[in-house]
Amino acid sequence: MGLPPESRAKRQLHGIRWDLKTQLLAMAVDRLSELVWTKTKDALHGRNKPKSVLRLLIDNQEQKREPETVAFDSPEAFERAREEMIKSMNGGSV
């Protein structure tokens, strides 16, 4: 394709929502948060560990579902579905 790995088109093609830079920054924030947390009284008791920013990004990505694939038995069925979709997008008028 000639596109860089961080391009939206290439990431979409491979199902990756966040580019590498964003993921690395999230990892850095996570490590820094954990490092600071280890110096607290809560860490001694294993409480209030900071939430992972990277995990939040990944969970958000996993929750986003791809649209369901639709198949048609004939060109006429496709045209009917197309017309219905156009009507719904235009508020009921073609």
Image (cartoon, rainbow, N blue to C red):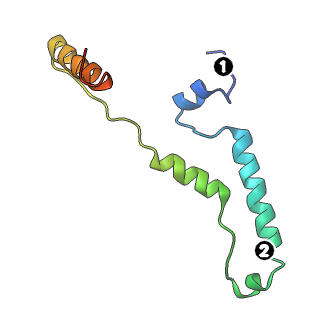
Earlier residue among tags 1 and 2: 1
- Of tags 1 and 2, the one toward the viewer is 2
| Residue found at x 41% / y 42% | 65
The circle on residue 49 is: none
> Residue 93: which quarter of the image?
top left
Residue lying furthest top in this view? 75
> Residue 89: which quarter of the image?
top left
Image quadrant for the N terminus?
Answer: top right
Q: Dot 1, crowdedness within 10 Å: few (<14), some or many (≥20)? A: few
How many angstroms separate mark 1 from mark 2 (CA)? 40 Å
> Residue 54: which quarter of the image?
bottom right
Q: Which residue is mark 1?
A: 3
Q: Amino acid at mark 1?
A: Leu
Image quadrant for the C terminus?
Answer: top left
Q: Whole-percent x and y of residue 19?
A: 67, 37
Q: Whole-percent x and y of residue 91?
A: 28, 25
Q: Whole-percent x and y of residue 60?
A: 53, 50
| Residue found at x 84% / y 78% | 39
Q: Is residue 65 above or below residue 43?
A: above
The circle on residue 37 is: 2
Q: Whole-percent x and y of residue 63?
A: 46, 50
Left or right: 71 with respect to 54?
left
Q: Is residue 5 above or below residue 55?
A: above
| Residue found at x 69% / y 69% | 50
Q: Amino acid at mark 2?
A: Trp
Count numbered badges in the picture.
Answer: 2
Q: Secondary structure at mark 1?
A: loop
| Residue closest to the eye, 92 or 32 | 92
Q: Secondary structure at mark 2?
A: helix
Q: Dot 2, crowdedness within 10 Å: few (<14), some or many (≥20)? A: some
Left or right: 29 with respect to 87?
right
